[in-house]
Image: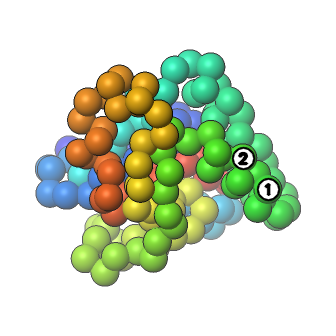
Amino acid sequence: MDISVYGDGDVGLMIPFESGFFWENQVDGNACRTVEAQGLYIPLSILIPKNLRDKLNDLFSALVSRNAAHEDVSALWAAIDASLPFEYKKIDPPFYCMGVSGRILNMEGTQWIRVKELRADYYRSYVMFAQTAIVDKKVMLWYPNSD
């Protein structure tokens, strides 16, 4: 089954594994490329309360605008990092994760990360699977792309 996540403006985590579900995201700025990966896509909207979700969506909207204008986004990424419901480390793309069109690289719209820990007890109890599903795993942070 093929499912597209671009166009809805949601930020989420793509956990790659052989699931039978292929998820597609638009990436790489104005190049408007798409990547497709097999696995589980978790929209962050199910992990965080509405007020935090709205703040995060506003930050990613600003990121899209600044990327489209080719402006510096480092301060904006710092604010996004502080607003995510987990601590993480950016990582290089693993060689084993191949999309339909080849290895999925880090580029605008997708960032490989290793989740270190969930930030608050709220997140651990709100979504019980989150601890085992995303902590210490190589996952992709998928976010809106400027096009």
Quadrant assignment, res 99: bottom left
Q: Is residue 126 above or below residue 62?
A: above
Q: How many marks?
A: 2
Q: Could you tell whether 34 is left or right of 55 in the image?
A: left
The one of 116 and 24 positioned closer to us in this rendering: 116
Secondary element under disc 1, as helix, strand or loop, is: helix
| Residue shown at the point (56%, 57%) measured from the top left | 109
Q: Amino acid at mark 1?
A: Ala
The one of 48 and 54 positioned closer to us in this rendering: 48
| Residue shown at the point (14%, 50%) measured from the top left | 20
| Residue shown at the point (41%, 74%) measured from the top left | 93
Contact between labelled residues 2 and 1, with CB atoms less than 8 Å apart: yes
Q: Could you tell whether 37 is left or right of 21 in the image?
A: right
Q: Is residue 32 above or below residue 76?
A: below
Q: Could you tell whether 22 is left or right of 75 in the image?
A: left
Q: Label 2 belongs to which residue? A: 79
Q: Label 1 belongs to which residue? A: 75
Residue 113 seen in this snapshot: yes
**Where residue 145 sits in the image (x, y, percent)?**
61, 52
Quadrant of image for the C terminus: bottom right
Taking the view exactly as shown, the residue that stands out farthest to the bottom is 95
Q: Could you tell whether 120 is left or right of 40 in the image?
A: right
